[in-house]
Image: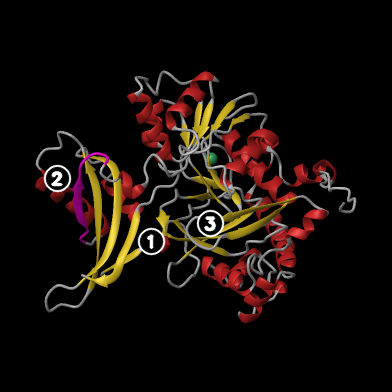
Amino acid sequence: MREQIRPPYYHETLDWKHLTAEYEPPFEFMTGARLWSPERIAEVQLARLQAAVQRASEVPFYQKLWSENGFTPSDIRSLDDLKRMPSYTIDDIRDSIERKPPMGDYQGLGLEDGAHTPLRLYTSGGTTGTPRPTIYSQWDREVGAILSARTFYMQGVRPGDAVINAWAYSTHNAAWIMDHALWQWLGAIPITTSTGNVTPTEKQIEFARLYGAASITATSDYLLHIADTARRMGLDPAKDFNFKTILSFGDTKAVEEAFGVPTYDSYAFHEVQYVAAECEAKDGLHIFEDAFIIEIVDFETGEPLPPGHKGNIVVTALYKTGTSQLRYNIQDISASYELAQCACGSWHKKLDYFQGRSDTMVKLRGVNVWPEACGKIISGHPGINGEYYCYVERVQPDGKPARDEMTIMVERVDGAGDSDRLREELAQLLKQKTGVAIGVELVERDGLRELTGHGHRAKLKRFEDRRGSIR
Ligand SMILES: [Zn+2]
């Protein structure tokens, strides 16, 4: 028999009073940190940043990155000094895993530490390549769950609400942190349907009706699919559910129209959990500034950009103790807002809605174009249903140098009229808004399902790089 070891019991290993004083749970947050002045926010951020940099200075990944770039923790004397710290991307994480498989040298804790403190391990990228693991300390899990619970509370979820969680309960963090937040920090009851692959959409609809679910959390794409399926089942999405609010990811307008209830967007990712959430003012996403510093940087130079300019999101998590993320360039495209007090009373800085991934960004004749931007431009056109799929290829017309061309495939609706005219209208719209010519290819309704994974995948595939060979 193996030796006797007393486990690190979950309720004993954390100072809960300290946790909730540092990072207020939703109810306290509404009248507390949410209303902090910009000066108070900056003061807390600097202290937390300096502590976070100290913690990371123990981690080989940061030791290497910082020494190669001549940065030392003592360089951070003000918030403005943050830009002296080198940023990094997913490529650096991949290199780190290659250097020290399978965990990389960027983790602040190892699995063996689980013997004295509760740990969780989640991975991103597991379906398409080498999994990128993140080890979360108990503190990191609880703060992440508190931030998630703040999001849901701000967006109308209340204790006693049953909430359908239609995110994938898998090796990825998303569904789990939402579950944790709803259960431990909100008094809500998660109904753990997971995605359409686990619980077919018809069943999700039955569950929502049977238990009178007050909310549902899913991507906008999947929510629209649910509305569509409900209609096919003879239901009216606006009348036959008990939803009070919808927790979406992505464009909310169409979802709001379909279900007839307020629908909110937010921004989160695997390693750091909820970063920013839309408030009732519905004008941008408030960053949880007691837990994060967010910068928007130029796609090419990496230099911080002023408000209103599109660039990559660079995240500095101030609260992490297990695996740190300091100036992580996540390559999501957004822009920051001018600092102002929001109609909701909060001074927490705002981030623009997610605009796409810069790793699918294509430079066409000097202009940056990406699939989500193209999808948005044509989305309101009455001749199509909003589904889209982009591909880029390298073409070489006779006697001319090779160049990249992007084509957007869209689903034509019944009664859309003349195809040539529709194609021409869409092409003109794209040219007008992006400044470059983009090809348009029409397919019939549901013709893109196989390509995008509509109805099956939580996050739809919107892009394919076919530049492997010259056509
Ligand atoms: Zn607000």
Give 169 or 424, whichever is nearer the viewer.
169
Contact between marks 2 and 3 (CB within 8 A): the answer is no
The mark closer to the camera, 2 or 3, is: 3
Q: Residue shown at 83%/44% (left/top)?
A: 9
Q: Is residue 320 left or right of residue 69?
A: right
Q: Quadrant of residue 367?
A: bottom left
Q: Count of labels shown?
A: 3
Residue 142 position in % (x across, y down): 71, 45
Please say whether residue 15 is visible from this viewpoint: yes
**Label 1: which residue?**
360
Q: Residue shown at 77%/60% (left/top)?
A: 112
Identify the element where label 2 is drawn. Answer: helix
Q: Residue shown at 76%/42% (left/top)?
A: 20
Q: Amino acid at mark 1?
A: Thr
Give 304 or 187, whichever is nearer the viewer.
187
Find out whether residue 224 is within the magenta segment: no
Q: Amino acid at mark 3?
A: Gly
- Scheme of colours in the image: secondary structure
The mark closer to the camera, 1 or 3, is: 3
Q: CA distance from mark 1 to mark 3?
A: 19 Å
Label 1 neighbour load within 10 Å: few <14, some 14-19, many 20+: many
Contact between marks 1 and 2 (CB within 8 A): the answer is no
Q: Is residue 457 left or right of residue 193?
A: left
Highlighted range, magenta: 437-446
Q: Earlier in the sequence, mark 1 or mark 3?
A: 3
Q: Earlier in the sequence, mark 2 or mark 3?
A: 3
Residue 323 position in % (x across, y down): 68, 60
**Label 2: which residue?**
422
**Label 3: which residue?**
126
